[in-house]
Image: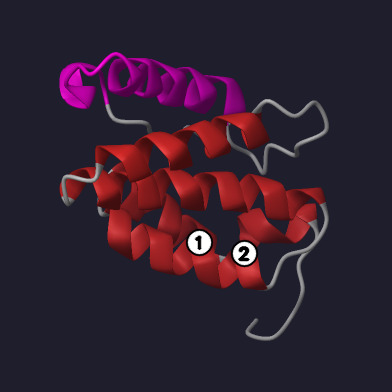
Amino acid sequence: MLGEEYVCNDIPSDPRFEKGFLLFNSCEWYLAHDIFEEIWHETYGTSRQTIQAILQVAVAHVHLQNGNTNGATILLGESLGRLKKVDIPNLGIDIELLRNAIEERLKLLQAGCDPYECDNPVLYKLV
């Protein structure tokens, strides 16, 4: 699959996507970032926005782990902005639940509260 460019329907069938999905949901943020970044580089169109948003959430959490709340706040805000676009493809993921989790964590960060007072964002597959 390396070197191919993806359209929306190809991404969920990529084994790397499933691996990134599992790493993200296990809070293995840096490893999830690596996988989603690789896919992002091979993706074009509006699907690229979805992958970039997921990637930004993972990187935001790497920043949180390193104590960089400002960097995390910026990336979560950018990710949320991408996920609120009307035409963004869901890639088989419940985008609304992801947006809600990001929004909750972002509000805590913006208020100067502990961002871990809420659940970590997770990727839920649509049934």
> Which stretch is magenta?
94-119
Residue at left offset 56%, top offset 38% = 78
SS category of the residue bearing label 2: helix
Residue 123 in sight from this viewpoint: no
Instruction: Please tell me which residue is depicted at 38% across the width and 34% down the height of the picture.
Output: 73
Residue 54 visible in the current orientation: yes
Residue 53 or residue 72, whichever sits in front:
72
Percent from the top left, x then y, of residue 124?
47, 32
- The image quadrant where one finds the N terminus is bottom right
Nearest to the observer: residue 25 or residue 121: 121
Give the x, y percent position of residue 123: 45, 37
Residue 14 placement: quadrant = bottom right
Q: Is residue 90 magenta?
A: no
Q: Which residue is mark 1?
A: 36
| Image quarter in which the C terminus is found | top right
As for residue 114 lying within the magenta part, the answer is: yes
Residue 33, picture quadrant: bottom left
Q: Badge 1: how crowded within 10 Å, few (<14), some, or many (20+)?
A: many
For the residue marked with disc 2, what is the amino acid?
Trp
Q: Amino acid at mark 1?
A: Phe
Q: CA distance from mark 2 to mark 1?
A: 6 Å
Most common SS among magenta residues:
helix
Horizontal arrangement in the rendering, residue 19 relative to residue 111 (left or right): right
Q: Are marks 2 and 1 in contact (CB under 8 Å)?
A: yes
Q: Which quadrant of the view contains residue 61?
A: top left
At x 38% / y 49%, what residue is drawn? 58
Q: Residues within 10 Å of mark 2 (few under 14, many from 20)?
A: many
Left or right: 119 in relation to 17 = left
Please tell me which residue is depicted at 74% across the width and 51% down the height of the picture: 47
Give the SS element for disc 1: helix
User: Mark 2 sits on what residue?
Assistant: 40
- On the image, the x and y values in percent for residue 11 come to 67, 59
